[in-house]
Amino acid sequence: MNPKAGDVLIVDRQASVQFNGANALILRVISVSDRATYDGWAWVLGYVLDPVTGEATVRREVFVLRGGLRCAAPGRWPLRRVGR
């Protein structure tokens, strides 16, 4: 998968062993770095979403295997921040 800004991804063990089990993330992509990495891997910058509310909780950059990324279920996550 080639993630792009706005995609909502499931980042779990398939993307990198560090995201196994309770460490899995739902990540809304901000950008994908163009810096050189190992073949098939990428640095992805995004917001971690709360799995219950869908609210962004923290900004994070993760190093992941592109082939292990999956799109989260569409329609479940807000398209943008809803007020403060």
Image (tube, rainbow, N blue to C red):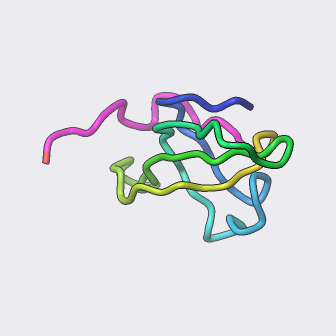
Q: In this rendering, would 72 be left or right of 67?
A: left
Which of 4 and 12 lies nearest the eye of the viewer? 4
The secondary structure that most of the magenta stretch takes on is loop
Q: In this rendering, would 66 be left or right of 57?
A: right
Q: Is residue 73 magenta?
A: yes
Residue 77, position as x, y percentages in the image: 42, 37
Residue depicted at x 57% and y 28%: 4
**Quarter occupied by residue 52:** bottom left
Residue depicted at x 63% and y 48%: 43
What are the residue bounds of the magenta stretch?
A: 68-83
Direction right: furthest residue:
39
Which of 50 and 11 lies nearest the eye of the viewer? 11
Direction left: furthest residue:
84
Q: In this rendering, would 30 be left or right of 57?
A: right
Q: How many marks?
A: 0
Residue depicted at x 83% and y 48%: 38
Residue depicted at x 51% and y 36%: 31
Q: Is residue 69 magenta?
A: yes
Residue 10, position as x, y percentages in the image: 63, 47
Residue 11, position as x, y percentages in the image: 65, 52
